[in-house]
Image (spheres, helix red, strand yellow):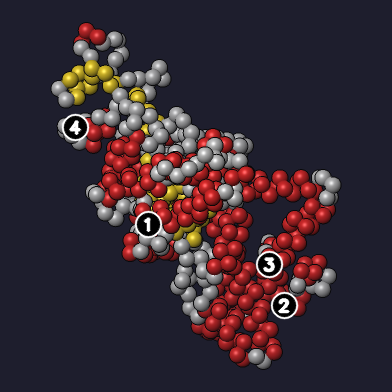
C-alpha cells in the first residue's frame, strides 16, 4: 500500500502534547490534538519529499513488473490540479488503492491549455516554467484531497468519542493510521529539454523540486520540436541526447532523489530528418552508426557543388541528401532500426525506461522492436502512449479484417474502407476488435515489454465531450433539466464527492481551522443554513 511513513495518530497526539508542555506560554490555547491532525493532514512538507516518496513507489512497481508482466502500471494525462485530484479520488473510491495508478503530465496539454500565449501546438513554444508550475499544482490538489478525506475521518472520530463508542473509535484511529495518500508518481514531460543540456538541467531541477520523480525526455531538436504524431520531426545524434539524460540524472542526484526515473523517448520511427551529422571519432562508434542511416548518394569530387557536405562510408565518397532548409534526410524505411539503436544507446547512457512513439497501436510492431532491444538489455521496458491520436476503432477493425482475410475467413460482409460505421459495432468483427482493444494493455505488457500504459490527452477530450453534451442540453429545449438530469442527478446517484462542491473546495477544512484558531468565536460555513446539507 502506498502510504507515507508517519507516526500513529496516538503517537502524534502524544508528541504534540509533550511539545506543548515544554513550550510554555507560546502554547497557551493551542490544542495538541489539533496540531497533530494538521500535521497528519500535511505529511508532505515539500516537493522533494514527494519526489523521494514517489520514486520509491515507482521503483517498487518496476521491480514487480520485472517479476510478473501482469503488474503493469497506468496513468491518465491531467491538465489541471483539479482533474488530477478527481482522478485519484475516483481511483481510491472504485479500487480502494492507488497502487499502480499514476498521473501523466503532458507537454501537449500544457501548450494547448496552460500557456499565457493561449492555445499553442505541441512545439515547445509555451513557457517552460508552466511545466513545473503544473506539477506543483497537481500535488497541491492531491495534498488537499488528503486533508479533506482525513478531515472526514477526524469528524467521525469526534462523533464516536462523544457517543462513547469505543469500538468505533478504535476502528477510526486504525483507518487514520493506515490511511493511503492520494500522492502518486507523476511522469512529467520535459519535451526536448527546452534548449541545451544546461537548460534541461535547470528545468529538471524545478520539476523535481515541484515533486516530479520521473522525467520523460525526447530525442528531437529542441528548437524544431514537433508533436510525436505529426510530421516534420528532427532528431539529434546520441551525444546531444545523452548529455541531456545525464543532465537530468545530475539534477536528481543533486537534490537527493537518488531513485529518480528517466524515460528516454525516441521519435525516430516517424522522424525522417536530422539537423546535424554526428562527429565520428572511431570507425563503427555510435556517431558512425547514426550517420550510417543517412540517405546518401555516391559521388566523385567532380560532382560536388559549393557547400556540399560529404562523408566517407565503406571506402566510398558519399553526399547526404539535404533539404533546402539544410536538414539531412534518413533512408526511407530505416525508422525501426534507428528506434532499436536509439533505445539500446539510451539505456546504456543511464535512462531507466523507454518510450517509442509509434504511428499505430500494434502489439506485434512494438514487441518486435522490444525483442531486439532485450537481446542486448534483457530488463528493457517501455512507457507506451495509448494515444488519442490513434483511431483505435478503425485501427483494430482493420487489423482484424486483414488478419481474417489472410486466414481465409469470409469478410465479404465488411467494407474495409467503411469499418467505422456504427452498423459494425455489434458485428462479430466489431465485437472482437473491441475485445482486443480491451485486452491491449495486458497483451502489450506481456508481449511487448510495456511497463506503463498512459493516455496523454484523455481529459482534454473528456472536458470537450462533457461540455458539448451540457451545452447542447442546457441551451436547448431541456433548459435547467439539461444540467440536473445530465450532471447533478448523476453525481448524486454515482456518489461523486464533488456534488458537495463547497466541501471539495476546502470549506470544511477552513471551518476546522477557524475552530482551532478562534474556538467558540469561530464563524463557520457548515451550519444549518448551508445548502450543501441538501446532499446528505
Q: Which residue is mark 3?
A: 495
Pointer 2 and pointer 1: residues touching (CB < 8 Å)? no
Front residue of 370/21: it is 370
Q: Is residue 386 above or below residue 232?
A: below
Lower position in the chain sequence, tag 2 or tag 1: 1
Q: Give the number of the mark in front: 2 or 3.
A: 3
Front residue of 58/503: it is 58
**Cα–Cα span, label 1 and label 4:** 40 Å
**Cα–Cα span, label 2 and label 3:** 33 Å
Q: Quadrant of residue 61?
A: bottom left
Q: How many marks?
A: 4
**Residue 520: x and y, percent?**
76, 78
Q: Which residue is mark 4?
A: 281
Q: SS at mark 1?
A: helix
Q: Which residue is mark 1?
A: 446
Q: Which residue is mark 2?
A: 519
Q: SS at mark 3?
A: loop
Question: Which numbered disc covers residue 69?
Answer: none
Q: SS at mark 4?
A: loop
**Residue 481: x and y, percent?**
82, 55
Front residue of 506/14: it is 506
Q: Dot 1: few (<14), some (14–19), or many (≥20) neighbours within 10 Å?
A: some
Lower position in the chain sequence, tag 4 or tag 3: 4
Amino acid at each position: 500500500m502506498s502510504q507515507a511513513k508517519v507516526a500513529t495518530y496516538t503517537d502524534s497526539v502524544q508528541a504534540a502534547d509533550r511539545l506543548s508542555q515544554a513550550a510554555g506560554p507560546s502554547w497557551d490555547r493551542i490544542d495538541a490534538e489539533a496540531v497533530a491532525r494538521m500535521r497528519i493532514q500535511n505529511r508532505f512538507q515539500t516537493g522533494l519529499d514527494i519526489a523521494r516518496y514517489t520514486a520509491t513507489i515507482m521503483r517498487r512497481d518496476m521491480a514487480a513488473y520485472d517479476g510478473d508482466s501482469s503488474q503493469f502500471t497506468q496513468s491518465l494525462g491531467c491538465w489541471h490540479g483539479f482533474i488530477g485530484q478527481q482522478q485519484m479520488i475516483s481511483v481510491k473510491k472504485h479500487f480502494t488503492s492507488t497502487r499502480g495508478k499514476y498521473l501523466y503530465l503532458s507537454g501537449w496539454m500544457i501548450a494547448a491549455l496552460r500557456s499565457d500565449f493561449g492555445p499553442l501546438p505541441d512545439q515547445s513554444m509555451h513557457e517552460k516554467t508552466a511545466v513545473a508550475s503544473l506539477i506543483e499544482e497537481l500535488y497541491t490538489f492531491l495534498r488537499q484531497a488528503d486533508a479533506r478525506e482525513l478531515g472526514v475521518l477526524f469528524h467521525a472520530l469526534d462523533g464516536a468519542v462523544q457517543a462513547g463508542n469505543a469500538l468505533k473509535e478504535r476502528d477510526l484511529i486504525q483507518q487514520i493510521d493506515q490511511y493511503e495518500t492520494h500522492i502518486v508518481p507523476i511522469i512529467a514531460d520535459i519535451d526536448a529539454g527546452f534548449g541545451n543540456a544546461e537548460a534541461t538541467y535547470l528545468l529538471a531541477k524545478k520539476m523535481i523540486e515541484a515533486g516530479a520523480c520521473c522525467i520523460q525526455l525526447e530525442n528531437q531538436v529542441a528548437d524544431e520540436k514537433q508533436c510525436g504524431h505529426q510530421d516534420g520531426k528532427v532528431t539529434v545524434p546520441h551525444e546531444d541526447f545523452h548529455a541531456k539524460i545525464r543532465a537530468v540524472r545530475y539534477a536528481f542526484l543533486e537534490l537527493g532523489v537518488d531513485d529518480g526515473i528517466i524515460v528516454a523517448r525516441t521519435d525516430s520511427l516517424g522522424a525522417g530528418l536530422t539537423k546535424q551529422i554526428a562527429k565520428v571519432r572511431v570507425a563503427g562508434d555510435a556517431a558512425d552508426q547514426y550517420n550510417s542511416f543517412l540517405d546518401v548518394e555516391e559521388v566523385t569530387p567532380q560532382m560536388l557543388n559549393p557547400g556540399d557536405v560529404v562523408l566517407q562510408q565503406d571506402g566510398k565518397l558519399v553526399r547526404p541528401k539535404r533539404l533546402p532548409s539544410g536538414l539531412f534526410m534518413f533512408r526511407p524505411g530505416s525508422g525501426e532500426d534507428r528506434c532499436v539503436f536509439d533505445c539500446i544507446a539510451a539505456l546504456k547512457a543511464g535512462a531507466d525506461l523507454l518510450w517509442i512513439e509509434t504511428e499505430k497501436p500494434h502489439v506485434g510492431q512494438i514487441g518486435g522492436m522490444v525483442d531486439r532491444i532485450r537481446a542486448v538489455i534483457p530488463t528493457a521496458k517501455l512507457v507506451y502512449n495509448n494515444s488519442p491520436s490513434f483511431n483505435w476503432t478503425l485501427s483494430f477493425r482493420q487489423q482484424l479484417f486483414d488478419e481474417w482475410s489472410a486466414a481465409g475467413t469470409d469478410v465479404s460482409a465488411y467494407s474495409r474502407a467503411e469499418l467505422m460505421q456504427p452498423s459494425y459495432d455489434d458485428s462479430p468483427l466489431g465485437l472482437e476488435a473491441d475485445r482486443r482493444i480491451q485486452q491491449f494493455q495486458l497483451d502489450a505488457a506481456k508481449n511487448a515489454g510495456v511497463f506503463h500504459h498512459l493516455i496523454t490527452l484523455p481529459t482534454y477530450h473528456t472536458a470537450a465531450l462533457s461540455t458539448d453534451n451540457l451545452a447542447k442540453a442546457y441551451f436547448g429545449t431541456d433548459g435547467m433539466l439539461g444540467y440536473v438530469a445530465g450532471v447533478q442527478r448523476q453525481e448524486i446517484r454515482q456518489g461523486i464527492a464533488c456534488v458537495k462542491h463547497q466541501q471539495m473546495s476546502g470549506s470544511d477544512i477552513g471551518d476546522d481551522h477557524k475552530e482551532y484558531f478562534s474556538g467558540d468565536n469561530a464563524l463557520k460555513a457548515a451550519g444549518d443554513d448551508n445548502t450543501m446539507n441538501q446532499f446528505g
